[in-house]
Amino acid sequence: MFRNSAERMRPVDVGRTVSVLLPVAVDGPYTYRVQNGLELAPGDIVRVPLGPREIVGAVWDDVPDGSVGHNRLRPVAHRYDAPPLDPTIRKFVDWVANYTLTPRGMVLRMVLRAPGALEPERAVEAVRIAGPPPERLTPARRRVLDIAADGAPWSRPALAAAAGVSSGVVSGLIEAGSLAVLHLPPPPATLPPDPDHARPRFDDGQSEAAEALRKMAAEGGYGVTLLDGITGSGKTEIYFEAVAETLRRGRQTLILLPEIALTTDFLDRFARRFGERPAEWHSEVSPRQRERVWRAVASGEAKAVVGARSALFLPFPKLGLVIVDEEHDGAYKQEEGVTYNARDMAVVRGHIGGFPVVLSSATPSIESRVNADQGRYRRIELTTRFAAAKLPEIRALDMRLHPPEKGSFLSPVLVQAMEATLAAKSQTLLFLNRRGYAPLTLCRHCGHRFQCPNCSTWLVEHRFRGQLVCHHCGHSEARPDRCPVCDAEDSLVACGPGVERIAEEVAARFPEARRIVLSSDLLGGVQRMRDELEAIRRGEADIVIGTQLVAKGHNFPLLALVGVVDADLGLAQGDPRAAERTFQLLAQVTGRAGRAGGDSHAYLQTYAPEHPVIAAIASGNREAFYAREIEARRVSGLPPFGRLAGIIVSAADRAGAHAYAGTLRRAAPIDTIAMVLGPSEAPLAVLRGRHRFRLLVQAPRGFDLQDFLRGWLAAAPPPRGSVKVQVDIDPQSFL
């Protein structure tokens, strides 16, 4: 049973009504009548009628609406025997909703996303030896009884499989009384980690950092620490010491990772340190297992959880530490529905719950770096790699001086380095942040370009699959043999390279080399990528060709050479974060090399070696980059020195979206502090069949942007028809 009566909160008293927040797009709770004999308190999870159906919700802290007659209120149908949502998670829901201008019900939906977990898990049916053998003892029955002779319980399928018989043989022994059915409690969703299972050995710099984090966890209380360490400096093992101390004190720990579905290596490292794997929470976990993890978290059974951004909304009753690994990663921003940044919301949750938060990165975000520089965050810096491993030697390869051969994309200098790496039995990584074979396919006869019918973007050729694919809406179509416009045969040309095209060039140059292409849209999905990442770690590949997922904290011990095929790719954008993102991506991917020791090299193929980002990476002078970028943000008043909010107006037709965007702009308050820009057509003007216009609000750091937007949107005429308005506080993408 979940409920501990000694821990019950004060029951809702006179009036016998409660406010219930429901996971629907409504900001306020509904008022319901409490039936006799039902004790309810804020946080209780209940089922209530809503229209013709019943829906799961939570008793909330709002004062019930007393304007509706008691006899007209509908009653609460059921209270689940599940732990109530504690005050910190309820405050967190309210805070996130207010900050993101999202209905509270939509935030609550992220908390109650495993409704099957509210019912107690069923007992496990098992069988064990219970009586003498039956009179008719066949060889098959004898094998079953021999296996079950030690008295240990078995599930029916497992016992049948172990004996090599059908399940009917086991059922016959049950009917004969030789085996008995029993019901066992379900196994735990996760076993408790042992904080003292395998204490690591640190060098001097690491020991000081580990002790600082351990002391922080021991003292408890709110505070944010930025663990700023170069690639390979041992940040994970260091923050594990904070995890260990939190576990010793009986508190729960949450570790957020940007690509948890792919990081089996991280889970293995956790198990080596603590003896058990943590509970996992991400989209690749089965619905059944998600229910078990949710229940284990809510009951306090799960002591450590590793998850994607949504794990931040799990109902931890004793959360004592949150770690955000790779805190700079854009995957922490939820772009649809409730638009939140999990890194920032982790800090908020720590503040509400009164516990420490650790942000870890080799390339911290500008926001986190400024917060550390200004004293809001504590900064722990690690400037050397573990075990004296050396950083790779990085060279900017000017493609104007060292161009590739005609029809190729790899400079002869890089090709020579690959040959030397292969001869040394080491691995090469070629990085290109572009999926598929080519980003554009056109007809050289009539000039027709293949465009997505739903989005204003070109279709990407995926030659391995024979498809033209839109990476925004998922539309795909077979690559034709003839131009659909002029009917010319053999006239279609692939323009530009993707990872598949680089793999084709590698296969032609190095036919004997073992190759792996790592891209998120290849057939086989997550499991294939997990298998291939493990194969790379085991040394079963000579050349790896990959997109940005290879830059996300993976450890490839044999990797000695990194070649960035197009280092300029992210720089030619109007996005104010383009330089920061490119710097982080290039620093992370080049940092994959040489982590296990020995000499290593990285080449950046570029047509702009003088660009500050390229120069900073090649010289290893990241402080120069941070100083320049921080000053540029300060001068322009961009985050973290100012505030931004994006407003996206979309509709099924362009005229409707454009008209309402103009109406919305004219309704904006006349304010000299907040500057409203736009509307302008979004760079990605059509997405999933909807036409899009953007407005941008820029304001000083201390400005109440939410209040400004709330008043503006309330005063504007409501959108009609297919028009929708989405507000994005602290936008990360400007497409």
Image (spheres, grey):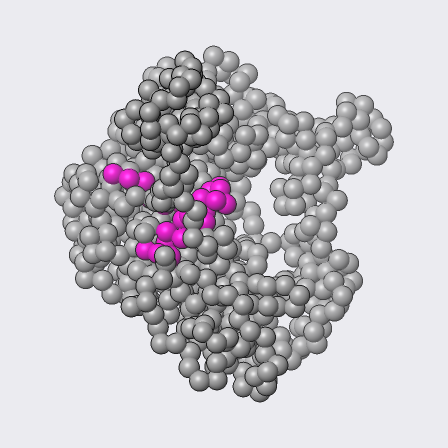
433 versus 44 height, above or below: above
Q: In which quarter of the image is the N terminus?
A: bottom left
Could one spot residue 393 in this view of the protein?
no
Q: Position of residue 307 (x, y in %)?
A: 40, 48
Q: Position of residue 178 (x, y in %)?
A: 37, 27
**Residue at horizontal 48%, vertical 84%?**
15
* Magenta stretch encompasses residue 194: no
**Residue at horizontal 57%, vertical 56%?**
336
Quick one: 637 or 322, which is closer to the camera?
A: 322
Q: Where is residue 284 in the image (x, y as percent from the top left)?
A: 49, 41
Q: Position of residue 678 (x, y in %)?
A: 64, 66
**Residue at horizontal 26%, vertical 36%?**
272
294 versus 561 height, above or below: below
Residue range (magenta): 275-300
Q: In which quarter of the image is the C terminus?
A: bottom right
540 versus 384 height, above or below: above
